[in-house]
Amino acid sequence: MKVCHFCGNKNLRKAQVQYTYRYNDNFLIVNDVPCEQCEFCGEQYFKGSVLKQIEKEFFSIYSHGKKVKKELIVPVEQFSEIHSSNN
């Protein structure tokens, strides 16, 4: 029986989720990634082969210039700057 290592719940379900892969300051967002997800806390468990496939895709994009389906522009802020501006 599989148990969530985070909360101890015994109910995991198959799901397809969005996964964000990060290496240095580069990101790859992959939709519909298969995993098992805890029904209580939401912790996600991925097969090693799935994560290796995502890593391979990341390096195909960033090292070999593979074209992607979509790109996003994401704003980045420092918390200390936004925190002090709200006081």
Image (cartoon, grey):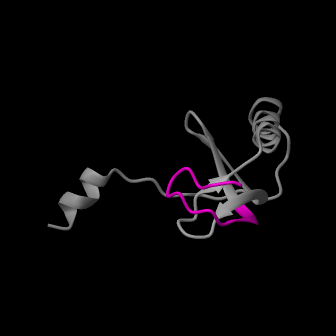
Q: Is residue 37 above or below residue 22?
A: below
Residue at 72% from the left image edge and 49% from the top image edge: 46
**Image side of residue 71 versus residue 24, left or right:** right
> Is 38 in the magenta?
no
Q: Is residue 87 left or right of residue 18?
A: left
Q: Quadrant of residue 73?
A: bottom right
61 left or right of 75 in image: right
* Residue 22 position within the rendered picture, expressed as x and y whole percent measured from the top left: 61, 41
Residue 58 drawn at (x, y percent)? 75, 39
Seen as rendered, the residue at the extreme left is 87
Query: Residue at position x 71%, y 55% from top?
Result: 1
The range drawn in magenta is 1-17
State the residue lying farthest toward the top: 63
Q: Residue at x 65, y 59 (%)?
A: 72
Closest to the observer, 13 or 23: 13
Question: Image point 72% across, 58% down: which residue?
Answer: 36
